[in-house]
Image (cartoon, grey):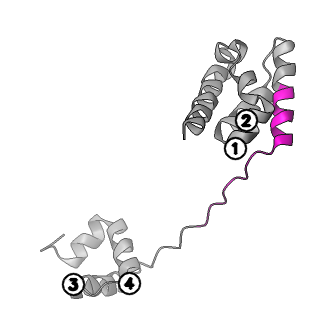
Amino acid sequence: YKGKRFSWVLRKDPHYSTWIVDQLATTTHEQMRRYAAFAQFHGIKPSAPEPEVEKPELLTVRKAIRARQLLQAYRESDRVAEEAVELLTILSTSPIGLDVLQETKLGVEVNNAFWKKNEDLGVSALAKAAIQRWKALARK
């Protein structure tokens, strides 16, 4: 925005104005400091700090065994319930240790053709995503 008037920048790009105000404490550039003061005068406040996102806890052996048992029960009943979809969603996104996968054989169940070829409620995509994540984990 070199050469532009402060008021023009303020009207055209409020995100830039917020960013400049956030940088006020760390900048030594006089033009940026003047613009930040201008933006604050016109009501632009520093943005709130990003909230800390909690990292999901690792899946325990106990939870992984229970998940495998539930998936196996759904597979044996030859039906896919919404609970199975939720479980696959959790499994495909939750962090899990390689040792837990090996001990529980959860990957064997999710890799079953019933889950990989099932078209109900996007089950196959969830199962394939989980397997791909776990294979990548094993390669590391």
**Residue 96 location in percent, x, y?**
70, 43
Callout 1 environment at 10 Å: few (<14), some (14 to 19), or many (20+)?
some
- Relative placement, left or right, of 48 versus 14 is right
Numbered mark located on residue 97 in the image: 1
Mark 4 or mark 2: which comes first in sequence? 4
Numbered mark located on residue 67 in the image: none
| Residue bearing mark 4 | 40
- Relative placement, left or right, of 110 versus 134 is right
Of labels 4 and 1, the one closer to you: 1
Q: Secondary structure at mark 3?
A: helix
- Please, what is the three-letter code of the amino acid marked with disc 2? Leu
Mark 4 or mark 1: which comes first in sequence? 4
Callout 3 environment at 10 Å: few (<14), some (14 to 19), or many (20+)?
few
Give above or below for 93 relative to 9: above
Numbered mark located on residue 31 in the image: 3
Of labels 4 and 2, the one closer to you: 2
Numbered mark located on residue 101 in the image: 2
- Please, what is the three-letter code of the amino acid marked with disc 1? Gly
- As for residue 94 lying within the magenta part, the answer is no
